[in-house]
Image (cartoon, rainbow, N blue to C red):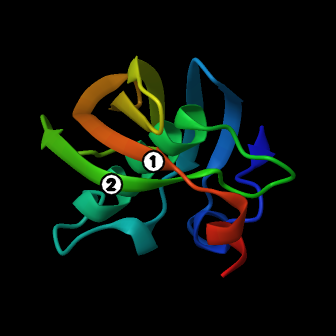
Amino acid sequence: MTSSSKNRFNHYLGIEICHADENGCRAALKIRPELYNSIEGVVHGGVTATLADVVMGHAAAPHVDGVQQCVTVESKIHYLAPARGELLVAESGVLKRGGRLIVMEARVTCDGELVAYATGTYARVKQKQREK
């Protein structure tokens, strides 16, 4: 596994990128108590949504030299079960590539159980936009 490039937030959470290319991404996050919501043992939904966003963004436009090449335009997540366990894993795939917009999907599992399904739209960013 590799770290999630230069993204400090992903590094802070402990997200590890297992695989990423233009067809999809797989990332993992070891669950620890700091990631729980107020119900002991249940991962906060924001953590699950972040992991889904990370794998969709990495595949929508793979990073170049550790720098993201797209931004999230919109996303939606369906929580299917509480995330309780030791490891969250998210995998993404491309639904449609347009000129500048890419529509993605992701599935998030916790110890092998499907806990969330997400979709998102991502926009490629130009070099000047990344430098601002």
The number of numbered badges drawn on the structure is 2
Residue 2 located left or right of residue 36: right
In the picture of the structure, the residue carrying the numbered disc 2 is 73
Of 5 and 116, nearer the camera is 5
Of callouts 2 and 1, which one flags the residue occurring earlier in the amino acid sequence? 2
| Vertical relation: 18 (above or below) 123 | above
State whether residue 97 appears in this view: yes
Which residue matches tag 1? 123
* In-front residue for pair 52/101: 101
Q: Position of residue 90 (x, y in %)?
A: 45, 34
Q: Residue at x 47, y 27 (%)?
A: 91
Question: Left of 99 or right of it: where is 10?
Answer: right
Asked if the residues shown at circle 2 and circle 1 are in contact, with their CB atoms under 8 angstroms apart, the answer is yes
Q: Position of residue 50 (x, y in %)?
A: 40, 56
Instruction: Between residue 67 and residue 78, name the one nearer to us.
Output: 67
The residue lying furthest to the right in this view is 65
Q: Where 7 sits versus 59, above or below? A: below
Question: Is 42 displayed left or right of 131 in the figure?
Answer: left
In percent of the image, x 24 and y 58: which residue is there?
A: 45
Q: Amino acid at mark 2?
A: Val
